[in-house]
Image (tube, grey):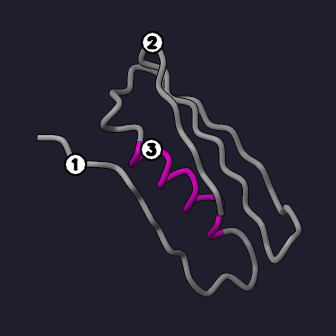
Amino acid sequence: MTTDASVKNNIAISVTHIQKEQALITKAIYHAMNILPTEAELFTIRCGISQAVYINDITNIVVVTDAIPTA
């Protein structure tokens, strides 16, 4: 699963690509309004997991993030 999010004018867009081996299974695009950049990472993770749980034969979901925590 590959996800990416961007925030512009307080609107977050999350794009999720879910693959099994080399085949693309699904692509989903989510929008959320009035979201802060710090919330966009959690929004993206949630959208990706919600897509992955509906796929048969999924045994693990691994979340890797490179976000730097903000105080």
Quadrant housing residue 13? top right
| Residue at image coords 62%, 70% | 53
Q: Amino acid at mark 2?
A: Asn
Going from N to C along the chain, the mark reached first, 1 or 2, is 2
Q: Point out which mark residue 9 bears.
A: 2
How many C-alpha atoms fall within 10 Å of the one at disc 2: few (<14), some, or many (≥20)? few
Q: Which amino acid type is shown beneath numbered disc 1? A: Pro
Percent position of residue 1, x then y: 65, 63
- Secondary structure of the residue carrying tag 1 is loop
Q: Position of residue 52 (x, y in %)?
A: 64, 66
Does label 1 or label 3 sit earlier along the sequence? 3
Query: Marks 1 and 2, how far apart in space?
Result: 21 Å
Q: Residue at x 35, y 30 (%)?
A: 37
Query: Mark 1 highlights which residue?
Result: 69
- Between disc 3 and disc 2, whose residue precedes? 2
Tell me the CA gap for discs 1 and 3.
15 Å
Q: Amino acid at mark 3?
A: Phe
- Give the mark toward the camera: 3 or 2: 2
Magenta run includes residue 47: yes
Position of 25 compared to 41: left or right?
A: right
Q: Position of residue 71 (x, y in %)?
A: 11, 40
Q: Is residue 46 magenta?
A: yes
Q: Is residue 43 above or below residue 31?
A: below
In the displayed structure, 20 sits above or below 36; it is: below
- Judging from the image, what secondary structure is the residue with disc 2 in? loop
- Considering the whole magenta stretch, tell me its main secondary structure: helix
Q: Which residues are magenta?
A: 41-53
Say which quarter of the image contains residue 61. Answer: bottom right
Q: Residue at x 53, y 38 (%)?
A: 5
Q: Quadrant of residue 14?
A: top right
- The residue identified by callout 3 is 43
